[in-house]
Amino acid sequence: MRNNNTSGNKRIKIMIAVLTAACILTFTGCSTYSSFSQTFINKPESVTEPAFTIGVIEPQSGKNAERGKAEIKGIELANSIYNNVDGYKVNLVKVDTQSTVGATETAIQALIEMKPVAIIGSCGDASSLAITDYIDDAQIPTITPSATNPLITQNSAYYFRACLTESQMGEGLAEYAYNALGSTKIGVVSIKNDTSTSALLDGFYSKIRELAGKKSKAIAASAEITSDEEEMKKALRDIRSAGVDVCFVSMGAEEMDTFFTNAEAMGLKGVTFLGTKSWGDEAFISMMSKHNGIKVVFPYETVLSKPGDSEDSQSEEGQKFRIEYASRYGDADIPTDNAALGYDSYLLLINAIHNAKSLEGPAIREAIWNFDGLKCATGVFSFDKTGNVVRSVTLATIRDGKAVLEYTTDSEAQAKRLEEIENEGVGSNQ
Protein backbone atom coordinates (compact mmCIF):
# COMPACT_ATOMS: atom_id res chain seq x y z
CA MET A 1 0.00 0.00 0.00
CA ARG A 2 2.88 2.36 0.86
CA ASN A 3 4.54 1.59 -2.52
CA ASN A 4 1.35 2.42 -4.45
CA ASN A 5 1.04 5.75 -2.67
CA THR A 6 4.66 6.65 -3.46
CA SER A 7 4.17 5.79 -7.11
CA GLY A 8 0.97 7.88 -7.22
CA ASN A 9 2.68 10.86 -5.64
CA LYS A 10 5.44 10.76 -8.23
CA ARG A 11 2.88 10.73 -11.07
CA ILE A 12 1.06 13.74 -9.53
CA LYS A 13 4.34 15.73 -9.24
CA ILE A 14 5.22 14.96 -12.85
CA MET A 15 1.79 16.08 -14.03
CA ILE A 16 2.07 19.38 -12.04
CA ALA A 17 5.52 20.04 -13.52
CA VAL A 18 4.23 19.43 -17.08
CA LEU A 19 1.19 21.70 -16.54
CA THR A 20 3.39 24.46 -15.06
CA ALA A 21 5.73 24.27 -18.03
CA ALA A 22 2.79 24.42 -20.42
CA CYS A 23 1.40 27.47 -18.63
CA ILE A 24 4.75 29.25 -18.80
CA LEU A 25 5.08 28.47 -22.53
CA THR A 26 1.57 29.80 -23.08
CA PHE A 27 2.29 33.07 -21.22
CA THR A 28 5.65 33.44 -22.99
CA GLY A 29 3.84 33.73 -26.30
CA CYS A 30 1.66 36.68 -25.21
CA SER A 31 2.15 40.15 -23.81
CA THR A 32 0.81 39.27 -20.37
CA TYR A 33 3.73 37.04 -19.52
CA SER A 34 5.90 39.91 -18.39
CA SER A 35 3.39 41.08 -15.80
CA PHE A 36 2.63 37.47 -14.80
CA SER A 37 6.33 36.82 -14.32
CA GLN A 38 6.87 39.98 -12.27
CA THR A 39 3.82 39.27 -10.10
CA PHE A 40 4.13 35.57 -9.47
CA ILE A 41 7.64 34.43 -10.37
CA ASN A 42 10.05 37.37 -9.81
CA LYS A 43 9.72 39.87 -6.97
CA PRO A 44 9.60 43.30 -8.67
CA GLU A 45 12.36 45.77 -7.78
CA SER A 46 11.35 49.32 -6.81
CA VAL A 47 11.49 51.65 -9.82
CA THR A 48 13.58 54.79 -9.25
CA GLU A 49 12.49 57.94 -11.05
CA PRO A 50 15.16 58.93 -13.60
CA ALA A 51 16.99 62.05 -12.51
CA PHE A 52 19.95 64.29 -13.24
CA THR A 53 21.82 66.84 -11.15
CA ILE A 54 22.44 70.54 -11.63
CA GLY A 55 25.25 71.80 -9.42
CA VAL A 56 25.13 75.14 -7.61
CA ILE A 57 28.41 76.74 -6.57
CA GLU A 58 27.74 79.91 -4.61
CA PRO A 59 29.09 81.72 -1.52
CA GLN A 60 26.93 80.77 1.44
CA SER A 61 29.39 82.27 3.92
CA GLY A 62 31.95 85.07 3.81
CA LYS A 63 31.74 88.56 2.30
CA ASN A 64 29.66 87.56 -0.74
CA ALA A 65 27.19 85.39 1.17
CA GLU A 66 24.26 87.80 0.87
CA ARG A 67 24.42 87.81 -2.93
CA GLY A 68 25.11 84.09 -3.12
CA LYS A 69 22.15 83.22 -0.91
CA ALA A 70 19.91 85.48 -3.00
CA GLU A 71 20.91 83.60 -6.16
CA ILE A 72 20.27 80.28 -4.43
CA LYS A 73 16.78 81.48 -3.48
CA GLY A 74 16.04 82.19 -7.13
CA ILE A 75 17.49 78.86 -8.25
CA GLU A 76 15.55 76.88 -5.65
CA LEU A 77 12.35 78.71 -6.55
CA ALA A 78 12.77 77.82 -10.22
CA ASN A 79 13.52 74.22 -9.30
CA SER A 80 10.36 74.02 -7.19
CA ILE A 81 8.30 75.13 -10.20
CA TYR A 82 10.17 73.30 -12.98
CA ASN A 83 11.58 70.15 -11.44
CA ASN A 84 10.99 67.75 -14.33
CA VAL A 85 12.58 67.80 -17.79
CA ASP A 86 11.31 65.24 -20.29
CA GLY A 87 10.53 62.76 -17.51
CA TYR A 88 13.75 63.38 -15.56
CA LYS A 89 13.62 64.82 -12.07
CA VAL A 90 16.05 67.70 -11.55
CA ASN A 91 18.10 67.51 -8.36
CA LEU A 92 20.14 70.42 -7.01
CA VAL A 93 23.48 69.92 -5.26
CA LYS A 94 24.95 73.01 -3.57
CA VAL A 95 28.53 73.70 -2.52
CA ASP A 96 29.88 76.75 -0.66
CA THR A 97 32.73 78.87 -2.08
CA GLN A 98 33.04 80.63 1.30
CA SER A 99 33.80 83.78 -0.76
CA THR A 100 37.44 82.74 -1.21
CA VAL A 101 39.35 81.41 -4.21
CA GLY A 102 40.93 78.55 -2.24
CA ALA A 103 37.61 77.26 -0.95
CA THR A 104 36.11 77.69 -4.43
CA GLU A 105 38.69 75.37 -5.98
CA THR A 106 38.01 72.75 -3.32
CA ALA A 107 34.26 73.15 -3.81
CA ILE A 108 34.31 72.83 -7.61
CA GLN A 109 36.38 69.65 -7.45
CA ALA A 110 33.93 68.12 -4.97
CA LEU A 111 31.00 69.24 -7.12
CA ILE A 112 32.41 67.72 -10.31
CA GLU A 113 32.78 64.41 -8.46
CA MET A 114 28.98 64.43 -8.09
CA LYS A 115 28.59 64.34 -11.92
CA PRO A 116 26.30 67.33 -12.52
CA VAL A 117 25.17 67.79 -16.12
CA ALA A 118 25.38 71.58 -15.69
CA ILE A 119 26.37 74.13 -13.04
CA ILE A 120 25.07 77.51 -11.88
CA GLY A 121 27.45 80.00 -10.23
CA SER A 122 29.21 81.87 -8.94
CA CYS A 123 28.22 85.43 -8.04
CA GLY A 124 31.83 86.52 -7.41
CA ASP A 125 34.21 87.39 -10.26
CA ALA A 126 37.26 85.85 -8.57
CA SER A 127 35.45 82.61 -7.72
CA SER A 128 34.02 82.35 -11.24
CA LEU A 129 37.47 82.86 -12.78
CA ALA A 130 38.87 80.16 -10.48
CA ILE A 131 36.60 77.42 -11.84
CA THR A 132 36.96 77.99 -15.60
CA ASP A 133 39.69 75.35 -16.13
CA TYR A 134 37.80 72.79 -14.05
CA ILE A 135 34.52 73.11 -15.95
CA ASP A 136 36.32 73.12 -19.30
CA ASP A 137 38.22 69.94 -18.47
CA ALA A 138 34.99 68.28 -17.33
CA GLN A 139 32.99 69.76 -20.27
CA ILE A 140 30.19 70.94 -17.97
CA PRO A 141 28.13 73.92 -19.24
CA THR A 142 28.06 76.56 -16.49
CA ILE A 143 26.12 79.82 -16.15
CA THR A 144 27.08 82.62 -13.80
CA PRO A 145 24.02 84.64 -12.86
CA SER A 146 25.85 87.86 -12.00
CA ALA A 147 29.65 87.84 -12.38
CA THR A 148 30.60 90.49 -14.97
CA ASN A 149 34.35 90.14 -15.61
CA PRO A 150 34.82 89.66 -19.39
CA LEU A 151 37.54 87.05 -18.86
CA ILE A 152 35.13 84.61 -17.22
CA THR A 153 33.43 83.71 -20.49
CA GLN A 154 36.22 84.80 -22.81
CA ASN A 155 38.71 82.27 -21.43
CA SER A 156 36.28 79.34 -21.25
CA ALA A 157 34.55 77.15 -23.82
CA TYR A 158 31.77 76.16 -21.40
CA TYR A 159 31.04 79.30 -19.37
CA PHE A 160 27.97 81.50 -20.00
CA ARG A 161 26.71 84.66 -18.35
CA ALA A 162 23.04 85.46 -17.58
CA CYS A 163 23.72 89.07 -16.62
CA LEU A 164 24.99 91.87 -18.81
CA THR A 165 28.64 92.90 -18.64
CA GLU A 166 29.62 96.25 -17.16
CA SER A 167 30.44 97.62 -20.63
CA GLN A 168 26.95 96.66 -21.87
CA MET A 169 25.39 98.45 -18.90
CA GLY A 170 27.50 101.52 -19.65
CA GLU A 171 26.26 101.53 -23.23
CA GLY A 172 22.68 101.38 -21.98
CA LEU A 173 23.20 104.37 -19.69
CA ALA A 174 24.74 106.34 -22.58
CA GLU A 175 21.81 105.57 -24.89
CA TYR A 176 19.39 106.73 -22.21
CA ALA A 177 21.33 109.96 -21.60
CA TYR A 178 21.77 110.90 -25.25
CA ASN A 179 18.70 109.44 -26.97
CA ALA A 180 15.99 109.34 -24.29
CA LEU A 181 16.92 112.53 -22.44
CA GLY A 182 18.43 114.29 -25.43
CA SER A 183 21.35 115.53 -23.38
CA THR A 184 24.37 117.17 -25.01
CA LYS A 185 25.80 118.34 -21.69
CA ILE A 186 26.78 115.18 -19.85
CA GLY A 187 28.99 115.04 -16.78
CA VAL A 188 31.11 112.18 -15.44
CA VAL A 189 32.41 111.93 -11.88
CA SER A 190 34.56 108.87 -11.23
CA ILE A 191 36.61 107.67 -8.28
CA LYS A 192 40.39 107.62 -8.57
CA ASN A 193 41.94 104.18 -8.97
CA ASP A 194 38.52 102.49 -8.96
CA THR A 195 38.86 99.51 -11.27
CA SER A 196 35.41 98.15 -10.42
CA THR A 197 33.64 100.61 -12.72
CA SER A 198 36.29 101.02 -15.42
CA ALA A 199 34.54 98.70 -17.88
CA LEU A 200 31.20 100.44 -17.29
CA LEU A 201 32.80 103.82 -17.98
CA ASP A 202 34.49 102.44 -21.10
CA GLY A 203 31.12 101.28 -22.41
CA PHE A 204 29.54 104.63 -21.52
CA TYR A 205 32.18 106.71 -23.32
CA SER A 206 32.23 104.35 -26.30
CA LYS A 207 28.47 104.60 -26.84
CA ILE A 208 28.46 108.40 -26.44
CA ARG A 209 31.14 108.67 -29.15
CA GLU A 210 29.12 106.35 -31.37
CA LEU A 211 25.91 108.34 -30.91
CA ALA A 212 27.27 111.89 -30.85
CA GLY A 213 30.39 111.50 -32.97
CA LYS A 214 34.01 111.27 -31.91
CA LYS A 215 34.51 115.03 -32.04
CA SER A 216 31.37 115.81 -30.09
CA LYS A 217 31.54 117.87 -26.91
CA ALA A 218 28.61 115.94 -25.37
CA ILE A 219 30.79 115.26 -22.33
CA ALA A 220 30.71 118.78 -20.91
CA ALA A 221 32.49 118.10 -17.61
CA SER A 222 34.46 115.28 -16.05
CA ALA A 223 36.24 114.83 -12.75
CA GLU A 224 38.22 112.08 -11.07
CA ILE A 225 37.99 112.44 -7.31
CA THR A 226 38.40 110.65 -4.00
CA SER A 227 35.55 110.33 -1.51
CA ASP A 228 36.78 113.49 0.21
CA GLU A 229 33.89 115.93 0.67
CA GLU A 230 35.83 118.95 -0.55
CA GLU A 231 36.63 117.17 -3.80
CA MET A 232 32.95 116.31 -4.16
CA LYS A 233 32.03 119.97 -3.76
CA LYS A 234 34.53 121.04 -6.42
CA ALA A 235 33.14 118.43 -8.86
CA LEU A 236 29.60 119.68 -8.18
CA ARG A 237 30.65 123.29 -8.86
CA ASP A 238 32.15 122.19 -12.18
CA ILE A 239 28.91 120.38 -13.05
CA ARG A 240 26.85 123.46 -12.26
CA SER A 241 29.20 125.76 -14.17
CA ALA A 242 29.11 123.56 -17.30
CA GLY A 243 25.30 123.41 -17.30
CA VAL A 244 25.31 119.61 -17.01
CA ASP A 245 21.83 118.04 -17.03
CA VAL A 246 22.85 114.35 -16.88
CA CYS A 247 25.74 113.12 -14.75
CA PHE A 248 27.25 109.68 -14.23
CA VAL A 249 28.69 109.12 -10.74
CA SER A 250 30.45 105.91 -9.64
CA MET A 251 30.04 105.94 -5.86
CA GLY A 252 28.16 103.80 -3.36
CA ALA A 253 25.34 104.62 -0.95
CA GLU A 254 27.35 106.26 1.86
CA GLU A 255 29.39 108.51 -0.47
CA MET A 256 26.34 109.39 -2.58
CA ASP A 257 24.47 110.47 0.54
CA THR A 258 27.20 113.07 1.14
CA PHE A 259 27.33 113.96 -2.56
CA PHE A 260 23.58 114.55 -2.82
CA THR A 261 23.50 116.50 0.45
CA ASN A 262 26.04 118.91 -1.00
CA ALA A 263 24.21 119.07 -4.35
CA GLU A 264 21.03 120.08 -2.53
CA ALA A 265 22.89 122.65 -0.42
CA MET A 266 24.19 124.23 -3.63
CA GLY A 267 20.70 124.38 -5.08
CA LEU A 268 21.69 122.11 -7.96
CA LYS A 269 18.46 121.12 -9.72
CA GLY A 270 17.33 119.46 -12.90
CA VAL A 271 20.21 116.96 -13.06
CA THR A 272 19.52 113.28 -13.61
CA PHE A 273 22.22 111.20 -11.94
CA LEU A 274 23.27 107.89 -13.51
CA GLY A 275 24.97 105.20 -11.45
CA THR A 276 26.00 101.59 -11.13
CA LYS A 277 23.84 98.52 -10.55
CA SER A 278 24.70 98.73 -6.84
CA TRP A 279 22.25 101.63 -6.69
CA GLY A 280 19.51 99.02 -6.79
CA ASP A 281 20.65 97.61 -3.44
CA GLU A 282 18.45 98.06 -0.38
CA ALA A 283 21.00 100.34 1.32
CA PHE A 284 21.02 102.80 -1.58
CA ILE A 285 17.24 102.79 -2.04
CA SER A 286 16.79 103.41 1.69
CA MET A 287 19.32 106.27 1.59
CA MET A 288 17.45 107.95 -1.27
CA SER A 289 14.44 108.51 0.99
CA LYS A 290 16.42 111.52 2.26
CA HIS A 291 16.82 112.95 -1.24
CA ASN A 292 13.37 112.73 -2.79
CA GLY A 293 13.99 115.68 -5.12
CA ILE A 294 16.88 113.96 -6.92
CA LYS A 295 16.32 111.58 -9.81
CA VAL A 296 18.62 108.58 -10.14
CA VAL A 297 18.78 105.99 -12.93
CA PHE A 298 20.84 102.80 -12.89
CA PRO A 299 21.13 99.36 -14.53
CA TYR A 300 18.76 96.85 -12.96
CA GLU A 301 18.01 93.34 -14.16
CA THR A 302 15.41 92.11 -11.74
CA VAL A 303 11.74 91.91 -12.69
CA LEU A 304 10.38 95.42 -12.96
CA SER A 305 7.19 97.06 -14.11
CA LYS A 306 6.22 100.66 -14.73
CA PRO A 307 3.77 102.17 -12.23
CA GLY A 308 0.27 101.61 -13.57
CA ASP A 309 1.22 98.72 -15.84
CA SER A 310 -1.46 96.06 -16.20
CA GLU A 311 -0.63 92.43 -15.61
CA ASP A 312 -1.14 91.83 -19.34
CA SER A 313 1.72 94.17 -20.17
CA GLN A 314 4.18 92.17 -18.07
CA SER A 315 5.88 88.98 -19.26
CA GLU A 316 4.22 85.72 -18.26
CA GLU A 317 7.44 84.41 -16.73
CA GLY A 318 7.97 87.71 -14.92
CA GLN A 319 4.50 87.49 -13.41
CA LYS A 320 5.10 83.91 -12.35
CA PHE A 321 8.42 84.79 -10.76
CA ARG A 322 6.93 87.63 -8.69
CA ILE A 323 3.90 85.61 -7.57
CA GLU A 324 5.82 82.45 -6.71
CA TYR A 325 8.64 84.36 -5.01
CA ALA A 326 6.17 86.13 -2.72
CA SER A 327 4.38 82.85 -2.02
CA ARG A 328 7.60 81.06 -1.09
CA TYR A 329 9.48 83.80 0.75
CA GLY A 330 6.80 86.28 1.82
CA ASP A 331 5.64 89.67 0.56
CA ALA A 332 8.23 91.51 2.66
CA ASP A 333 11.12 89.75 0.87
CA ILE A 334 11.71 91.83 -2.28
CA PRO A 335 13.61 89.87 -4.95
CA THR A 336 16.99 91.32 -5.91
CA ASP A 337 18.85 91.22 -9.21
CA ASN A 338 20.73 88.19 -7.93
CA ALA A 339 17.55 86.25 -7.11
CA ALA A 340 15.97 86.97 -10.48
CA LEU A 341 19.15 86.08 -12.40
CA GLY A 342 19.56 82.87 -10.38
CA TYR A 343 16.00 81.96 -11.36
CA ASP A 344 16.69 82.67 -15.03
CA SER A 345 20.01 80.76 -15.00
CA TYR A 346 18.10 77.63 -13.97
CA LEU A 347 15.48 78.24 -16.68
CA LEU A 348 18.19 78.64 -19.31
CA LEU A 349 19.78 75.32 -18.38
CA ILE A 350 16.61 73.23 -18.30
CA ASN A 351 15.50 74.68 -21.64
CA ALA A 352 18.91 73.85 -23.10
CA ILE A 353 18.73 70.27 -21.78
CA HIS A 354 15.23 69.89 -23.23
CA ASN A 355 16.30 71.27 -26.61
CA ALA A 356 19.48 69.19 -26.69
CA LYS A 357 17.61 65.94 -25.92
CA SER A 358 20.84 64.98 -24.23
CA LEU A 359 22.64 65.13 -20.90
CA GLU A 360 26.04 65.47 -22.56
CA GLY A 361 27.95 68.71 -22.03
CA PRO A 362 28.79 69.55 -25.66
CA ALA A 363 25.15 69.06 -26.73
CA ILE A 364 23.82 71.26 -23.91
CA ARG A 365 26.39 73.94 -24.74
CA GLU A 366 25.32 73.92 -28.39
CA ALA A 367 21.68 74.28 -27.34
CA ILE A 368 22.52 77.38 -25.26
CA TRP A 369 24.33 78.91 -28.24
CA ASN A 370 21.25 78.26 -30.36
CA PHE A 371 18.78 80.15 -28.14
CA ASP A 372 16.98 82.73 -30.26
CA GLY A 373 15.05 85.05 -27.98
CA LEU A 374 14.19 82.69 -25.10
CA LYS A 375 11.77 84.52 -22.78
CA CYS A 376 12.66 84.35 -19.10
CA ALA A 377 11.77 86.46 -16.07
CA THR A 378 14.35 89.22 -16.53
CA GLY A 379 14.15 89.47 -20.31
CA VAL A 380 14.73 87.74 -23.63
CA PHE A 381 17.92 85.69 -24.00
CA SER A 382 20.25 84.97 -26.88
CA PHE A 383 24.00 84.32 -26.58
CA ASP A 384 27.09 85.05 -28.63
CA LYS A 385 29.80 82.44 -29.17
CA THR A 386 31.81 83.70 -26.21
CA GLY A 387 28.95 82.92 -23.83
CA ASN A 388 27.73 86.48 -23.27
CA VAL A 389 24.05 87.35 -23.36
CA VAL A 390 22.87 89.63 -26.15
CA ARG A 391 19.85 91.69 -25.16
CA SER A 392 18.49 95.10 -24.31
CA VAL A 393 19.63 96.95 -21.20
CA THR A 394 17.02 97.62 -18.50
CA LEU A 395 17.35 100.77 -16.41
CA ALA A 396 15.48 101.61 -13.22
CA THR A 397 14.68 104.65 -11.14
CA ILE A 398 13.36 104.94 -7.57
CA ARG A 399 9.77 105.86 -6.76
CA ASP A 400 8.03 105.53 -3.41
CA GLY A 401 10.97 103.62 -1.98
CA LYS A 402 11.05 101.02 -4.77
CA ALA A 403 13.07 100.40 -7.91
CA VAL A 404 10.77 100.70 -10.93
CA LEU A 405 11.36 100.45 -14.64
CA GLU A 406 12.57 103.67 -16.25
CA TYR A 407 13.92 102.68 -19.68
CA THR A 408 14.76 99.73 -21.90
CA THR A 409 17.27 100.33 -24.66
CA ASP A 410 16.15 100.21 -28.28
CA SER A 411 19.17 98.17 -29.34
CA GLU A 412 20.57 94.92 -28.03
CA ALA A 413 23.96 95.40 -26.38
CA GLN A 414 26.81 93.20 -27.59
CA ALA A 415 29.45 92.36 -25.01
CA LYS A 416 32.97 93.39 -25.95
CA ARG A 417 36.09 91.29 -25.52
CA LEU A 418 38.55 92.62 -22.93
CA GLU A 419 41.08 93.72 -25.54
CA GLU A 420 38.38 95.71 -27.36
CA ILE A 421 37.56 97.55 -24.14
CA GLU A 422 41.20 98.24 -23.39
CA ASN A 423 41.94 99.48 -26.93
CA GLU A 424 39.05 101.96 -26.80
CA GLY A 425 40.39 103.56 -23.63
CA VAL A 426 38.65 105.93 -21.27
CA GLY A 427 38.27 109.66 -21.81
CA SER A 428 35.73 112.17 -22.99
CA ASN A 429 37.63 113.23 -26.09
CA GLN A 430 39.12 109.94 -27.25
Image (tube, rainbow, N blue to C red):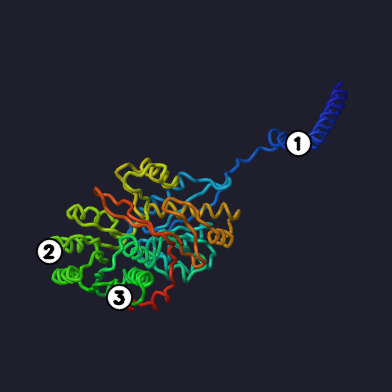
**SS at mark 3 in the image:** loop
The circle on residue 31 is 1
Query: Residue 422: which quarter of the image?
Result: bottom left
Question: In this picture, is 320 found above or below 148?
Answer: above
Q: Is residue 102 visible?
A: no
The circle on residue 428 is 3
Which quadrant is the N terminus positioned in? Answer: top right
Residue in the image at 42% along x and 75% along y = 420
Marks 1 and 2, the one that precedes in the sequence: 1
Where's residue 387, x and y in %?
A: 48, 65
Tag 1: residue type? Ser
Q: Is residue 277 left or right of residue 239?
A: right
Where's residue 424, x and y in %?
A: 38, 77
Which quadrant is the C terminus positioned in? Answer: bottom left
The residue that disc 2 covers is 266
Q: Nearer the viewer, residue 132 or 246?
A: 246
**Residue depth check, mark 1 versus mark 2: number of the one nearer the observer:** 2
Residue in the image at 29% along x and 65% along y = 183
Residue in the image at 28% along x and 63% along y = 275
Marks 3 and 2, the one that precedes in the sequence: 2
- For disc 2, the neighbor class at 10 Å (few under 14, some 14 to 19, many from 20) is few
**Mark 3 to mark 1: distance in Å?**
79 Å
Q: Is residue 358 left or right of residue 75?
A: right
